[in-house]
Image: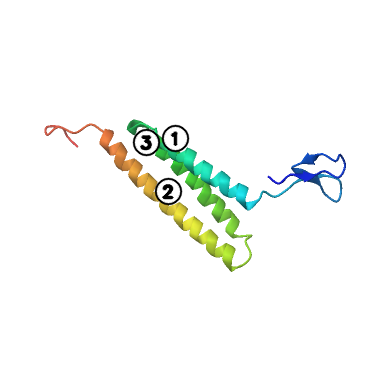
Amino acid sequence: MVARENPRSGSQSDRQTGPAGEWRWLPVSLLTELAILVLAAFIGFEVISKVPNTLHTPLMSGTNAIHGIVVLGGILLIGPAHGVIPDVLLVIAIAFGTINVVGGFLVTDRMLEMFKGRKKEGDEP
């Protein structure tokens, strides 16, 4: 976050005052956002690589729920969005999120089929 000097106290702070004297958070710089993205990707990869095979199915189900929320957020944002670029980006995000949710549920279903017991030849369907 960019630290700016507070005109009232003279100390450095990541907040500044607005016209009415209320506190406003300053925007984060692009470099800071990229650093957070890279660190989050690295930590996420390290955490996921340590998950045992038996926990991948519940983990994928939770990820599907999160992506469902992302798709819902994209649908809610496409209404108030103005302009061609935001509309195109939101449609792409909704499409990729939907593909991810559907694919995740298909893979989860296939993995759950592996845990079901095999039927014997004499058993009824």
Left/right of residue 15 with respect to residue 9 in the rendered view:
left
Which residue occupies 71% across, 46% down? 2
**The disc labelled 1 sits on which kind of residue?**
Val
Question: Residue 123: x percent and y percent?
Answer: 15, 32
Is the residue marked by circle 2 packed among few (<14), some (14-19), or many (20+) residues within 10 Å? many
Which residue occupies 28% across, 38% down? 113
Left/right of residue 24 with respect to residue 92 in the rendered view:
right
**The disc labelled 2 sits on which kind of residue?**
Val
Comparing labels 2 and 3, the label whose residue is closer to the camera: 3
Question: Residue 6: x percent and y percent?
Answer: 82, 43
**The disc labelled 3 sits on which kind of residue?**
His
Observer-nearest of 82 and 4: 4
Considering the numbered disc 2 on the image, is that residue within a helix, a strand or a loop? Answer: helix
Identify the residue under disc 1.
47
First reached walking from the N terminus: tag 3 or tag 1:
1
Q: CA distance from mark 2 to mark 3?
A: 15 Å
First reached walking from the N terminus: tag 2 or tag 3:
3
- Residue 56 numbered tag: 3
